Image (spheres, rainbow, N blue to C red):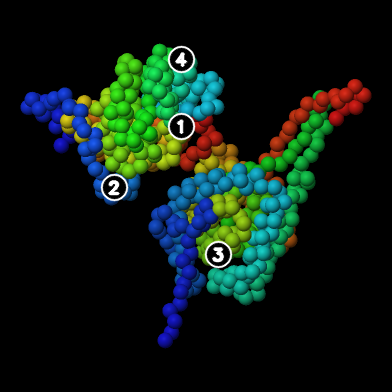
Amino acid sequence: MDRVEITKTYKIYIGGAFPRTESGRYYTPKRGEKALGNICLSSRKDVRNAVVAARGVHNKWAGKSAANRSQILYRIAEMLEGRKQQFIEELILQGSTKSQAVKEVIASVDRLIYYAGWCDKFAQVFSSVNPVASAHFNFTAPEPMGVVSIVCKEESGLLGIVSAIAPVLAGGNTCVLLASEQRPLCAITFAEVLNSSDVPGGVVNILTGKRTELIEHMASHMDVNGFLYCGTDKKDINTVQQLAVENLKRVTIRAFEGLMNDDHNTPYYIDDFIEMKTTWHPIEKIGATGSAY
Amino acid sequence: MDLVIFVEQQAFMGKSKAPQIPDFRLSPRIDQVGVGDRISRITTRSIKSSSKLQGLKMILNMIDLTTLEGADTQGKVSQLCNKAKFLHGSNPDLPTVAAVCVYPNFVSQAKKALLGTNINVASVATAFPAGQSSLDVKISDTKLAVDNGADEVDMVISRGRFHQGEYNYVFDEIAAVKEACGSARLKVILETGELGALDKVRRASDIAIYAGADFIKTSTGKISPAATLPVTCVMLEAIRDYFYESGTMIGMKPAGGISNSKLALQYLMLVKETLGDAWLSNQWFRYGASSLANDVLMQIEKQRTGNYQSKDYFSKD
């Protein structure tokens, strides 16, 4: 007797759990005639819940030592490496050729390793000690921005996600991410990787669904501090920039062309989602010898 | 039938009478599964748009903004009073809260800060939160609060005595504190988290009501579980039965653990459907809460602006 195939239910990822969308809706992206699966059509309330989860865990994630964040990013890469085959199959299912798929997965692992290395180094590169004209020791150091909304690149199922979140996480931020609308499979499988990689629940939240419905809520939410838009759609970009004004979200637009390229390995992607804090520390004369700090 | 109309009819027919003090051992038994079923029908409903907005404003107006910490300072109390008066600067159309609730030694300060507003000052008393002290101490604690100008007194019952079956002791204690309150309204905290089964909650509610409580209140907020919907349902039913018996309205105050608007709206539904519209004012229904106000404010702003809100833009209380 033929075995009935057990197909996977792709659910969304919020706060370290895999709920169905609260709206109960789904859509069925297709590759030619073949349906890829029934995918959650998330609603604005899923965005709300995801932001609550991301905000709730932000202090915990930002408070981890840089070295520990580095270890965790490395761990994601390790877990991804172990499940390469599954991602390759999914990418092929979604329209990649075999060799493209292999390249994309390997590039994703390498990119995670690259940003894992930066976690405990970018602060040294971007911070500074500033000469000032008064009796102060003046220095500037980076801090995480907070909760970041990410709209992933439509054309890239896996590398688009990894390239977007790795620098955001390295900087100590948490995020709410909207996966590619037509290539959502890898996003949810990647959530399973995150879930088994010591990433605290809520640090990355992954939604699937329609951009036209969700972008507006991701951009207008007052508790979101930054927005990363990966793509080139003028109308979307315009919407995001307008709505972000309300609470002065820092918006970054990245076209993400040629994602396999090493151009996208850069600490300046981390720099986009950190805030610089400058401290003026009064200088005190220590002892009577005349030596000052 | 609406409760108030029912009692008016009873009075018209000459049936209204001063209620006899019952034998509290015979308080009604509570069907726990039935209560659970009733609550599940409330929690699966949702209130939207204009009715939600109206409900949220009503909730704001029913909040006893509370700070009851060992670490309370005059600064904290003055901040709380200010929050009570000006809930959210950018929306002047909001109601104020019903009262602020503090320890007795902060009453005179709070009273002064709230002069000229219609916000009451409530004070906990009677060796709050444990209530493990002598009657004399409890009475003088109450007098301290009242003499400093408290409009409302929140007392705790002696749960230990209650568990020992000394219902008369509990009754007499409440009656004595009620006398010490003078014109201040008395809220009696049952601390339902320490009472156990719903039968006990009903019995303690009956004792408090017959002993002269103006309000019955679920919890101190120091014990978990604090207020829950099932417990509140049982207490509301005790209030309803007493109203049928005597025609006297008693207030209800769930306190502790109500920190979001959705839950607060469910309490409102429960009150409306158990007791009716007459209880839907801060004269008869209150929430004891510290973080609820900001969540309600955030929901109101969401309705007004269309954007989900961040607590960064609301003053701490």
Tell me whether marks 1 and 2 sit on the same chain. yes
Mark 1 or mark 2: name the one nearer the start of the chain.
2
Chain containing mark 1: B
Chain containing mark 4: B
* Mark 3 or mark 2, whichever is nearer to me: 2
* Mark 1 or mark 4, whichever is nearer to me: 4
Q: Which residue is mark 2?
A: B32
Q: Are marks 4 and 3 in contact (CB under 8 Å)?
A: no
Q: Is residue A247 left or right of residue A119?
A: left
The residues bearing labels 3 and 2 have C-alpha atoms spaced at a distance of: 43 Å
What amino acid is found at the position of numbered circle 1 in the picture? Answer: Ser
Q: Which residue is mark 4?
A: B108
Give percent across and percent down for residue B213. 29, 25
* Mark 1 or mark 2, whichever is nearer to me: 2
- Which quadrant of the figure has residue A59? top right
Q: Are marks 1 and 3 in contact (CB under 8 Å)?
A: no
Q: Which residue is mark 1?
A: B290
